[in-house]
Amino acid sequence: MSFAGLTVDDPNPDFVRIPDASGDLNLTGDLSISLWIKRTENTPGDEWFIRKNFAYAWKFSNSIPYFYMWTPGLTLVEPSPGTSISAGSDWHHMAAVYNAAEEKISIYIDGGLNVSQTIQGVVIPEDQGDLILGFYNDAGMIGMVDDVRIFNTALTADEITELFQGY
C-alpha cells in the first residue's frame, strides 16, 4: 500500500499514520476532505476512519457518519435525519467542506449536499500531529478507504459533484 510516496509494508494494516512533521497538512483556514469509503462490516459503537488531531475527524457511530471540527467546545456535525451508510458491496463518496469566511461546514454524500451547519469559534491549532486513516483508540472502521484528498480551500458544490462523478 502506498500514499504519494508513503509506503505501508503490512499487507493488512489496521490503520495508516501519515507523519506530518513538516506541517503541510496543518490547515487552519478553509478545508475540504474528499474520500471514498466501503464498509464491509457493521459494528456497534464508533468506527473512526479519518482523524487529524485537534483539527478534524470523521467517524461512523451505528452506521451514521459524523464529522467533527475542533472549536472551544468541539463541534459535531450530524447528518440529515435518516442518513446511514451500512456495510455492503457499494462504495460511497463522502466530502466535508469548511468555509472559514462563512463559518459553515457542509457535508456531501454521494455527490449531494446532505447538511450544512454554521459554526462559530473554530480554533484549529497550528500543531495538529499526524493524519490517521482507519483507526482511533481501538475503534477503527472495518472496510476500505480510497482516494483521500485534502484541500486547503472550500470546494464548491460543483467541484464536489465532479469528484463524485470522476471516480
Image (tube, rainbow, N blue to C red):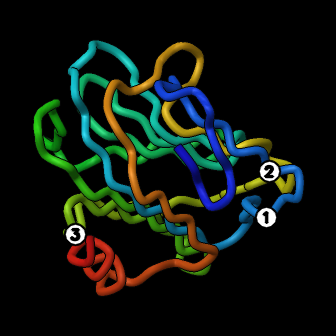
Few, some or many residues within 10 Å of mark 1 (<14, 14–19, 20+): few
Going from the N terminus, do you reach mark 1 or mark 3 first? 1
Residue, disc 3: 111
Few, some or many residues within 10 Å of mark 3 (<14, 14–19, 20+): many
| 59 lies left or right of 65 | right
Under mark 1, the amino acid is: Asp
Judging depth in this view, the residue of 13 and 113 nearest the camera is 13
Few, some or many residues within 10 Å of mark 2 (<14, 14–19, 20+): some
| 164 lies left or right of 150 | left
The residue at the point 46 percent across, 42 percent down is: 58
Spatial CA span between label 2 and label 1: 7 Å
Q: Answer whether labels 2 and 1 touch (C-beta < 8 Å).
A: yes
Residue, disc 2: 20
Residue, disc 1: 24
Going from the N terminus, do you reach mark 3 or mark 2 first? 2
Q: Give SS at disc 1.
A: loop
Where in the figure is residue 160, as x and y percent of width and height?
A: 33, 76
